[in-house]
Every structure is written in structure tokens, then in C-alpha cells.
């Protein structure tokens, strides 16, 4: 099958490798653009969120490149993400396309449904062969997360703006070309070596900013206006609350989610509200306990779980002494407005730290 799929940060190359190993022809999605978003928004319901519109636009672009089937993962429970597969499928049918959409619910939520669809995707491969492929994919996921974390740490220290981003892109190319465990390890070492070539200011004491919110706008740089890079160039080291490996452990291979975040949120939001709404509340508290200077909440416009979390942010921010900037994003959002708000937020944090006289950082990397 010629299988297409949505673009979501570095996960894209991992899905490509899995599909190739299973004998399919992946229609690798291009990085989303404003044209991709406009195409999706043209056919999506008006109040659908920006991840829905970007993915729909990507599907339409992939159909023009020969895709006859799509795969997608989605949520289950009190979140509209669980309806995206059905709605995407119906929109494509209404537009005259016959492409099949294989929607994978979390395996521990709908196990029989997941295994049936996985069995079809694996084709004639044995379950042992599939396990070996997934093991390689996991190794690549870990390498990608490590590379991202290193880039986030080095970007505010670089002496020449853009060096980190260039080294990061080169590292992605190395990992993209790696096909087996040995090559993945070699590519990982080469990618990290590229990062170590970056000239940095060892005396710099960058701000520490946590990024929380809905998974897609956290992991897809186009959807968040490249906020990590923007904050890095403003002199801030960022850490997301979600990485590919942590999401896999907490949300794909477990039914409980990130128990650390959920337990921290429990006194203030006692039940799951869908998506990562409850996690966002707990993650603000976790970043505060780790000594971070501020938090940026990223949310698609109309995302109910993040709206619920946002309603608690003023109280949580005051109680735990950590400023929170919330950015709701849709197709009407402009890069200039985002940049201006980030600059103002960083300036606020700098003034706040200057007034407190605190430049130490007791926290650790979130895993």
C-alpha cells in the first residue's frame, strides 16, 4: 500500500522507517506550510482545531502524490481527537476520494481493534519480525529525543545565531539515513558530535522555560510557530513536558498517563478532562518545583481540555510563584504576534530574576 500520514515533528521519520520495513510504500509528508493549513481549513469544520486542519491539509497534499491509504493515531475518552479519524475519512469521501484511513486507538484502550489493524499493517511479517522493527524504531525515537534536548540546551548558549539549528538539521539527516541498530547508534553519535562543535558562551545563565499543553502543538514546530527556536534565540533554555519517548511510555503503553503530573494536579483538577488538560496543570507545578523561571502553555484554539487548564493557571501561577504565558493558536494566528508576546514574556522573566537575585538552577531534565 502507498500509505500517507500526518506530519508531527521528528516522529515522521520513525513512521517512515516502520512502513518501509513492513513492505509498504510511505508517502512521506512534507513539512507543513501555510498552504497546507489553508487547504485543511478550507474543508474542515470552522471550529475544528489547528492539528485537525494541518493533518487534513497534509492528507490532501499526499493524495495528489499517490497515497491510497492513511494511518493515524488518536485519543480515546473525553477528547475530540478520538473523532478525528472518522471525520477526516468522511470529509475525504465527500471530496470524492476513496482512500482508506486506518485509525489506531491506544492499544490498551481498544486492544482488539488495535491488534486487528496492526495485523493488517504487518501483512506477512511475523510478530517476532514486527517486534524487531519496533525495537529499532524505539532506538531511533530515543536518539531523536536526545538530540532535541541537546539542541534546546545549547541554543541559548550559542555564539553565532543559527549554529544549533543547522547542527540539529544535520543530525536529523544522519538519523534519517540510519536503517539498523548499528547505523542508528553511529548516526546518534555523529549527530551529537555535530552539536558539540557549536561554539558556546560557558558563562551564560539562560532562563529556564517549560513548555506544556496539547501534544500536537508541542511536537510540531510549524503548529507552534517554532516557539522553541524563538525562545532559544531570546536566551532561554526550554524543556517540553512531552517528548516522543515519554509519551509512548505514559500514554501509549499505559492507561494511567503521566502519574507524576496527574498526582500534582489532583488537588486542583481532580479528574481527567481529556487530552493533556489535567497534565498541563500538574506540569506547571512540576516546573515550578524544579526551579524554572516560567512556563508557556501551547493550545489549539477551541481545545476544551486546555481551556479548562487555562482557567486554573492564574491561581496555580500565583500559588507556586511561576509566570505562565498561554498561547491559543489557530489559522488566524500570525508569527509577529507570537514573537512579540514571547519577547515580552522573556523580558518579564529577566526582570523578575534580576529583582530576586537568583541565578542558580536546581532542576533536572524532565523525562
Image: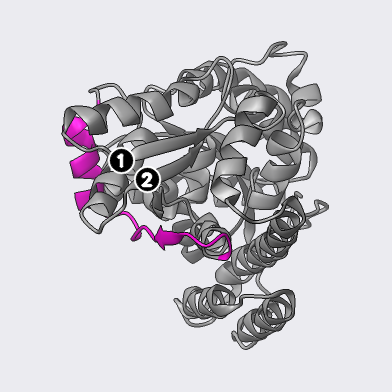
* Residue at 41%, 54% in the rendered image: 1
Q: Circle 1 sits on which residue?
A: 99
Decide: is 78 above or below 119.
above
Q: Are marks 1 and 2 in contact (CB under 8 Å)?
A: yes
Where residue 253 sits, quadrant-wise, is top right
Magenta residue check for 105: no
Crowd tier of the residue under label 1, counting other residues whose Cα lies within 10 Å: few below 14, some 14–19, many 20 or above: some
Q: Which residues are magenta?
A: 21-44
Name the residue nearer the viewer: 54 or 201. Answer: 54
| Residue 275 image offset from top left, x and y in percent | 56, 25
Q: Is residue 84 left or right of residue 336?
A: right
Q: Position of residue 256 (x, y in %)?
A: 77, 26
Q: Secondary structure at mark 2?
A: strand
* Residue 329 is at least partly visible in this image: no
Q: Residue at x 61, y 27 (%)?
A: 113
Quadrant of residue 321 within the rendered picture: top right
Location of mark 2 (residue): 69
Label 2 packing within 10 angstroms: few (<14), some (14-19), many (20+): many
* 232 relative position to 322: left or right: left
Q: In the displayed structure, would residue 149 be above or below residue 246?
A: below
Front residue of 91/336: it is: 91
Residue 307 marker: none
Residue 110 in the image, given as x and y percentages of width and height: 65, 24
Colouring mode (rainbow / by chain / secondary structure / one colour): one colour
Q: Which of the marked residues, 1 or 2, is nearer the chain's N terminus?
A: 2
Q: Residue at x 40, y 52 (%)?
A: 3
Amino acid at each position: 500500500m502507498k500509505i500517507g500520514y500526518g506530519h508531527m515533528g521528528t516522529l515522521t521519520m520513525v513512521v517512515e522507517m516502520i512502513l518501509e520495513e513492513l513492505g509498504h510504500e510511505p508517502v512521506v509528508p512534507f513539512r507543513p506550510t501555510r498552504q497546507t493549513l489553508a487547504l485543511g481549513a478550507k474543508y474542515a469544520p470552522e471550529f475544528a482545531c489547528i492539528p485537525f486542519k494541518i493533518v487534513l491539509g497534509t492528507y490532501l497534499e499526499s493524495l495528489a502524490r499517490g497515497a491510497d491509504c492513511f494511518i493515524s493515531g488518536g485519543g480515546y475518552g473525553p477528547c475530540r481527537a478520538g473523532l478525528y479519524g472518522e471525520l477526516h475519512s468522511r470529509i475525504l469521501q465527500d471530496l470524492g476520494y476513496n482512500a482508506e484511513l486506518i485509525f489506531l486507538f491506544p492499544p490498551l484502550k481498544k486492544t482488539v481493534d488495535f491488534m486487528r489493524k496492526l495485523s493488517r499493517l504487518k501483512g506477512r511479517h511475523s510478530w517476532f519480525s514486527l517486534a524487531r522493527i519496533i525495537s529499532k524504531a524505539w532506538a531511533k525515537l530515543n536518539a531523536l529525543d536526545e538530540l532535541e534536548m541537546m539542541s534546546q540546551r545549547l541554543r541559548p548558549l550559542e555564539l553565532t545565531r543559527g549554529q544549533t539549528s543547522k547542527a540539529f538539521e544535520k543530525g536529523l539527516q544522519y538519523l534519517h539515513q540510519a536503517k539498523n541498530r548499528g547505523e542508528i547508534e553511529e548516526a546518534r553519535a555523529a549527530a551529537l558530535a555535530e552539536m558539540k562543535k557549536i561554539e558556546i558562551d560557558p558563562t551564560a545563565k539562560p532562563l529556564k522555560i517549560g513548555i506544556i499543553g496539547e501534544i500536537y502543538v508541542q511536537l510540531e514546530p510549524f503548529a507552534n510557530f517554532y516557539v522553541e527556536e524563538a525562545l532559544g534565540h531570546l536566551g532561554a533554555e526550554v524543556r517540553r513536558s512531552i517528548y516522543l519517548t515519554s509519551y509512548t511510555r505514559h500514554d501509549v503503553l499505559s492507561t494511567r498517563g503521566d502519574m507524576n503530573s496527574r498526582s500534582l494536579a489532583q488537588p486542583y483538577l481532580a479528574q481527567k478532562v481529556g487530552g493533556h488538560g489535567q497534565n498541563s496543570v500538574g506540569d506547571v507545578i512540576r516546573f515550578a518545583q524544579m526551579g524554572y523561571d516560567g512556563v508557556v502553555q501551547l493550545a489549539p484554539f477551541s481545545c476544551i481540555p486546555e481551556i479548562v487548564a487555562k482557567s486554573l493557571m492564574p491561581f496555580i501561577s500565583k500559588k507556586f510563584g511561576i509566570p505562565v504565558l498561554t498561547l491559543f493558536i489557530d489559522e488566524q494566528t500570525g508569527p509577529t504576534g507570537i514573537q512579540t508576546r514571547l519577547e515580552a514574556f522573556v523580558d518579564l522573566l529577566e526582570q523578575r530574576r534580576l529583582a530576586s537575585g537568583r541565578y542558580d538552577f536546581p532542576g533536572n531534565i524532565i523525562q
